[in-house]
Amino acid sequence: MTFLISYWGEQIGQKIRKITDCFHCHVFPFVEQEEGRLGTLQQLQQQSLELQEVLGETERFLSQVLGRVQQLLPPWQVQIRKMKAVYLVLNQCSVSATHKCLIAEGWCASSDLPTLQQVLQGSSSEAGVSAVVHRIPCRDMPPTLIRTNRFTASFQGIVDAYGVGRYQEVNPAPYTIITFPFLFAVMFGDVGHGLLMFLFALAMVLAENRPAVKAAQNEIWRTFFSGRYLLLLMGLFSVYTGFIYNECFSRATTIFPSGWSVAAMATQSGWSDAFLAEHPLLTLDPAVSGVFLGPYPFGIDPVWSLAVNHLSFLNSFKMKMSIILGVTHMTFGVVLGVFNHVHFGQWHRLFLETLPELIFLLGLFGYLVFLVIYKWLSVSAAGAAAAPSILIHFINMFLFSRSPTNQPLFPRQEVVQSTLVVLALATVPVLLLGTPLFLRWQHRRPLRPTGRQPEEDKSGILDDSDASVAGWGPDEEKAGCPGNGEEAEFVLSEVLMHQAIHTIEFCLGCISNTASYLRLWALSLAHAQLSEVLWAMVMRVGLRMGRELGVAAVVLVPIFAAFAGLTVAILLVMEGLSAFLHALRLHWVEFQNKFYLGSGYKLSPFTFAEED
């Protein structure tokens, strides 16, 4: 800013000069001659141009410096984070004043120990110091390390969401790779819907290495992308079960010739035009010769899609199928518990828990599965009308009674049923009291004296790979004993309480869990009926609107767009999510609780992956 100051008197001039000096102002005296004033103005303009040039050069230089800093800033940030992570780990080490070194104790996978020793030796030789690795004994429960890849990561995530397995416990993830997509497909069985899901997952699998796909930040997309292999198998299994149900967008397909002959029924029954006019519904009697030619080669016969009792037939078929799959799935879970007991040396649990559980489960519900399969194999189509009811037989089994109107399926069926119920009831006190009494006897049994005491490991090196778990208690509940070396106190009341809870949970769970598998039947029927309703209310209406080629083409475009949108939104997304959640529950509650505790914790190794 420029000010013109005019004053009279020397004293006022001195005061003005003091004020301008305080504000660091440039003072130019007013020259009387015009040439002098022009010279001063030109001089100031020249100085202003020089200053602007200097400021421009400085700004360009600073822009270049900041541009280089901007390029180097991300690597600097990564380097700083890595240094902070390294120093954070070093701060957790203990300092040995005697040996003047740092001592770090941590967990490492046995297979990675040679690599760890090699890395430490290589880095210490370059730095001029020595690093030594020792395997030390420990009574704490080790962490769990399960190595996964792109394919198995999503299935292991399903198991870990229930609980991380204990060290060396049976991992359900390898079996979940097959059972989870299959149980999902039982509820989602449709060739068309399964094919759409399979193609969507296949597209993600084929594009998984593209940087744009990996860098996507949308949370919903990342959720689908992380489970792409799970979706791939779910879609593939849904196509398989869709062929079994013979459903493709709720429409049946005729791949093989039907096993039912309408012509044979019409010929032998003498159906006339008058009879057909009076009877809009016709019945195919399998007892008539030539009407039922044999079972369909694969899946359900397409003629059932035309039958009025189609839903009743599917109800019976899918309900029995759900019971068979459920009992098989639960039995497999109990059998997997055998590997846990054998590995942890709990041999008493094989005879006091696993064997009674199998007798209870198979004696009641395994027998129900046997009745279903036996009736399928023994009753022919001609005698289907007089076939006995399995449900009444199963109810009479618990009531120790018989129904005169319900004939037995095989000789001495009542004796077999009564024997199985008695055996199942006899296993309950064994489950309740067997393990606590055995542990009490084992605890009170005097220890056998040995000839010599084992020598202490003075070197601190542990050669046995399983020595870290040598101090574990005999029970699964005592995994991870206190680190002070003292044995945990045995309290009979606590063991009895825990065993009573386990017995009640298993016995009542066998009933409730078997009923829970009926969700396979319910959701499968719901999915089929929703698909049927969507076809009838959208596509069928569009196909009936126009008979001419041009009109049909114009009408079917928006109709098909609506059908496709509703199929994706309702049948694929909503029904798929519902079937996924129910399959998840069947694995967590009905399957994994038979053998999997999930009371461990993950190994968290030092890594720069998150910082990168």
Image (cartoon, helix red, strand yellow):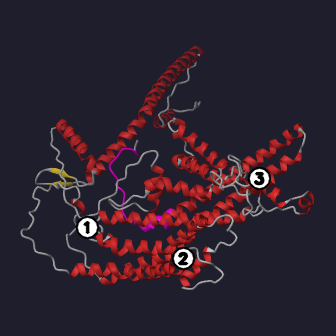
Image coords of residue 104 (percent x, y): 22, 53
Q: Is residue 222 visible?
A: no
> Which of the marked residues, 3 or 2, is nearer the chain's N terminus?
2
- The residue identified by callout 2 is 411
Nearer to us of marks 3 and 1 is: 3
Image coords of residue 358 (percent x, y): 42, 71
Residue neighbourhood size for the residue with mark 2, other residues' Cα within 10 Å, grouped as few (<14), some (14–19), many (≥20) = few
Residue 73 figure quarter: top left
The amino acid type, in three-letter code, at marker 2 is Pro
Q: Where are the magenta residues, as a range?
A: 587-610
Q: Secondary structure at mark 2?
A: loop
Q: Quadrant of the N terminus?
A: top right
The amino acid type, in three-letter code, at marker 3 is Trp
The amino acid type, in three-letter code, at marker 1 is Trp
Residue at point 17%, 37% (across, down): 125
Please identify the residue farthest to the top as the structure is shown. 35
Residue at point 16%, 80% (across, down): 446
Q: Secondary structure at mark 1?
A: loop
Residue neighbourhood size for the residue with mark 3, other residues' Cα within 10 Å, grouped as few (<14), some (14–19), many (≥20) = some
- The residue identified by callout 3 is 535
Q: Is residue 537 left or right of residue 256?
A: right
Whether 268 is among the magenta residues is no
Q: Which mark is residue 63?
A: none
- The residue identified by callout 1 is 472
